[in-house]
Image: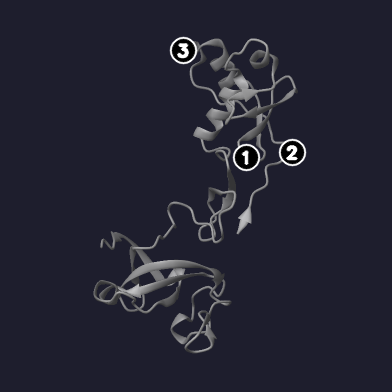
Amino acid sequence: MTLIEPSADSERTALAPDPSELDSRAARAWTERMAVRPREGSTYAVTSESGHTYLVDLTDHSCTCPDHQIRGEQCKHLRRVAIEITARRVAPPHHQRARCDVCGAVTFVSEDADPPHLCGNCRVLPGDVVVDRETGDSLVVAGVSEDRADEYVIEATGRTVAAHDTNEGYPPDDIVVEVTYLADATRRDDPRRYAFPYSRLHRTDAELVE
């Protein structure tokens, strides 16, 4: 897992639709060069074009700038945080940016999420049906392990998933997916689990429905 720390000197950039169709505060939120840096929980530090930095709290819907504190307006800083979250430039509240452990794409994960972290394109969930690339067998995902293929020891053999003969050629640091065979999953209450390297499995759009 690679967490991406927000830079303290993030480059200020503009994100502009047609400002003539927006009210003045919304136009400034879109067009002014600002830097938004996530902090703890639902708070964000916003450095404006003037160089001043204000603290936005989305839970309280508040900002420390004079426009909000004195006039009670939904200031450009509050609006800019919402814009950047919607554009997936910064993480939403109580989340953090991370690299997908499979493809390396930037994704957002809960602050207390356990590894591995997978993006929407790579994520497999319990009940998903996958196919073994080696045999063509249909399998049902039971879970994803925190251990990598060269760390996960198969109890029956005492060898790691990476060291298993049929997994030769797959990345030794691959994520391990625990699965059951589809036939067993539909016939048995407690089907036996098997461990596969992620790369050996082909994702499908199917899922097991009880």
Q: Quadrant of the N terminus?
A: bottom right
Amino acid, disc 2: Ala
From the image, state whether disc 2 or disc 1 is nearer to you.
1
Q: Is residue 107 above or below residue 182?
A: above
Q: Which mark is residue 10?
A: none
Q: Earlier in the sequence, mark 2 or mark 3?
A: 2
Of mark 1 and mark 3, the one earlier in the sequence is 3
Say which residue appears at 50% left-offset and 80% top-offset: 161
Give the mark toward the camera: 2 or 3: 2
Q: Which residue is mark 3?
A: 21
Whether label 2 touches label 1, CB < 8 Å: no
Question: Which numbered marker is on residue 41?
Answer: 1
Numbered marks: total: 3
Tag 2 residue: 8
In the rendered image, residue 99, in percent from the top left (x then y), is placed at 57, 53
Viewer-nearest residue: 87 or 41: 41
